[in-house]
Amino acid sequence: RASDGTTISPPDTVTVTATQTPSQTLVKALTGDSTGGAVAVGDELTYTVTMTNTGNTTLAIVVVSDALITPNSITCPTVAPGATCQLVGTYTVTQADADAGNIRNTAVVTSQACPTGSTDAGCTTTVDTPVPQTPSQTLVKALTNDSTGGAAAVGDVLAYTVALSDTGNTTLS
């Protein structure tokens, strides 16, 4: 008993086991276009890939990758619960993209929650960016030669040139 009349008891030790639950989400978005208009050949697109730690434990050595953009990866040494690891990169639209009408772009993340090769929704994400197709052509026919050199008349042999020009944004076949 203490001098003030309270009872002193020996210390108690309690062990509490917390379950660690690593978890994450991965979101990819087109966040910029150099022209601000419809996506077209030559535009520089900016993509942002964000991994958010939604678990209750810090994730170590988190790698966010996207093979299509430059830079194509970032490594975050640690990502605390609620924090993010973010990759921002650019891609220049090609003629092949316009011909396809779409840019399909996939990003992945590896961490304790997402081992290499995981197909879990929190480990991989794909964005499809439409590239509007406007196929168009012009055709011009011109008389290039008259066999008599004068005004065309019955029996003359006439030579023409025909020129076809691709005036759209897709390759014509």
Image (cartoon, rainbow, N blue to C red):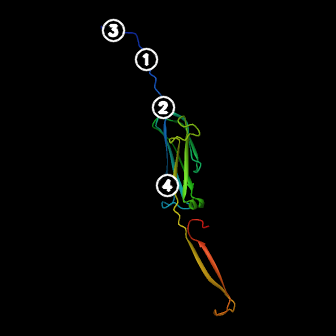
- Give the mark, 2 or 3, whose residue is nearer the N terminus: 3
Q: Is residue 49 above or below residue 94?
A: above
Q: Nearer the viewer, mark 1 or mark 2?
A: 2
In-front residue for pair 18/70: 18
Residue 32, numbered circle: 4
Residue 14, numbered circle: 1
- From the top left corner, tell me how far across and down residue 160 is, in percent: 65, 83
- Give the mark, 3 or 1, whose residue is nearer the N terminus: 3
Would you call the spot at circle 4 few (<14 residues within 10 Å), some (14-19), or many (20 or more)?
Answer: some
Amino acid type, mark 1: Val
State yes or no: discs 3 and 4 in contact (Cβ < 8 Å). no
Q: Quadrant of the C terminus?
A: bottom right
Amino acid type, mark 3: Thr
The residue beneath circle 2 is 21
In-front residue for pair 45/27: 27
- Give the mark, 1 or 2, whose residue is nearer the N terminus: 1
Q: Nearer the viewer, mark 2 or mark 3?
A: 2
Residue sitting at x 47%, y 27%: 19
Direction from residue 173 to residue 3 in the image, left or right: left
State yes or no: discs 4 and 2 in contact (Cβ < 8 Å). no
- Give the mark, 4 or 2, whose residue is nearer the N terminus: 2
Extreme left residue here?
Answer: 5
Q: Which type of secondary structure does the marked residue at label 2 adopt?
A: loop
Q: Is residue 73 above or below residue 59?
A: below
- Give the mark, 4 or 1, whose residue is nearer the N terminus: 1
